[in-house]
Image: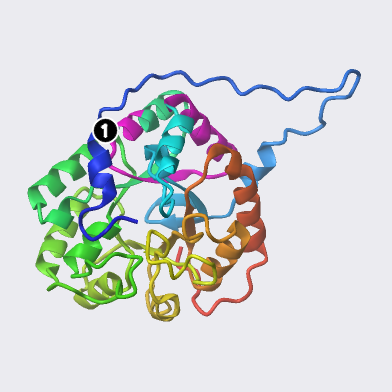
Amino acid sequence: MQRGINRRTFVQHSALASAGAAWGLSALAAPARTRGAEPPATTPTAAPAADMPCGKIGDLEISRLLLGGNLLSHYTHSRDLKYVYALAKQYNTDAKILDTLAVAEEHGINTVVVHNVPSVLGLLQEHRRRGGKMQWITCTFHALAGGDLSRFNREVQELVDAGTDALYISGVEADSTCGFRHDISAANSAERSHERNLDLLGRAFALAKAHGLPTGLGAHRLGPIQDCEEAGLGVDFYLKTLHHHNYPTAGLHYDSSFCPQPEEVVKFMQTVQKPWIAFKVMAAGAIPPKDAFEFAFAGGADFILAGMFDFEIAEDARLLREVFANMAVRQRPLHA
């Protein structure tokens, strides 16, 4: 996770924006079949897509599992293992990203969440040109973290023109505007360090919502959601981090924890009657998917956002369907 308002991805953005858009989706190789064996009687990818549970945000029907965009833009949380950034970039080529989008749709994932990264948006547009139906929920590249409302408005227009289906104010923007600027992994990350600027946040939200699309707010701390609910900003949906701290590096305080006070989050969100997308549920890979999904749904999340490489999608989608089908009675009813 990025530190304060100077996220590491600010540095990466210029490189990402100039990344080439060399299209060319490689064909998926058919698995070898034993000589003389009969072909399978059923189509293996039909059932997973049909069985994926969905909910609604506005008029959008959204799969309960959403594809996270960080890995697609080559950003990956990795504690202090610096080589992982280069590794993710080497693996997720343009062709591999297009493969990933196709595989996600095969398994019923119909929505991706991503920042305004031109190279990735170009690939999403190419996916649509090839017949893909993936929906986009997008946000600006943290313009409000620096208080730049004009840049925010310009980027929102870019996202709308590109074809986004929904908009949201990013977690970094909401955190910063509401006065939360300590590192998200720090022990004091839940404490306000600056005065909040709800006027700026409200004006930004009004500009985004004027486009008539579902418009949400992201947050890594609980405070921005409490502020928005108190101010009555008319947020359509929330993206909020949610994970427990029962993993070895939770207290490392370095790119290792993304949800301060999860118990307080679960308790407050019971009072919020708007769709909630939980993200960072696996604490950037520290928590196994099944454990993470169970905790997020039990805690009240309506949807789960997960960063996934292509080879992880089938199993994560299967686990999501299993966990959602077997979900015990929740204290917070589904709001989507």
Picture residue at 38% right of the left edge, 19% below the top: 22
Q: Is residue 118 magenta?
A: yes
Q: In the image, 78: left or right of 290?
A: left
Q: How many marks?
A: 1
Which portion, as a residue range, is magenta? Answer: 94-122
> Farthest residue in the right direction?
36
Picture coordinates of residue 335, whole percent (x, y): 45, 67
How would you rate the neighbour count of disc 1 (Cα within 10 Å): few for under 14, some for 14-19, many for 20 or more? few
Asked which colour scheme the image uses, the reply is: rainbow
Which quadrant of the figure has residue 253? Answer: bottom left
Q: Is residue 202 magenta?
A: no
Q: Residue type at mark 1: give it.
A: Ala
Say if 23 sits above or below 307 in the image.
above
Say if 223 sits above or below 40 in the image.
below
User: Is label 1 in a helix, a strand or a loop?
Assistant: helix
Q: Which residue is mark 1?
A: 15
Q: In the image, 79: left or right of 322?
A: left
Picture coordinates of residue 281, whole percent (x, y): 49, 61
Say if 216 sits above or below 331 in the image.
above
Picture residue at 24% right of the left edge, 66% below the top: 234
Picture coordinates of residue 47, whole percent (x, y): 68, 42
Picture residue at 22% right of the left edge, 35% below the top: 14
Q: Residue 134: in sight, yes or no?
A: yes
Q: Main secondary structure of the magenta part?
A: helix
Q: Residue 107: in sight, yes or no?
A: no
Picture coordinates of residue 164, whole percent (x, y): 31, 41
Which quadrant of the figure has residue 17? Answer: top left
Q: Quadrant of the N terminus?
A: bottom left
* Nearer-the-camera pick, 119 or 3: 3
Q: In the image, 231: left or right of 75?
A: left
Q: In the image, 297: left or right of 122?
A: right
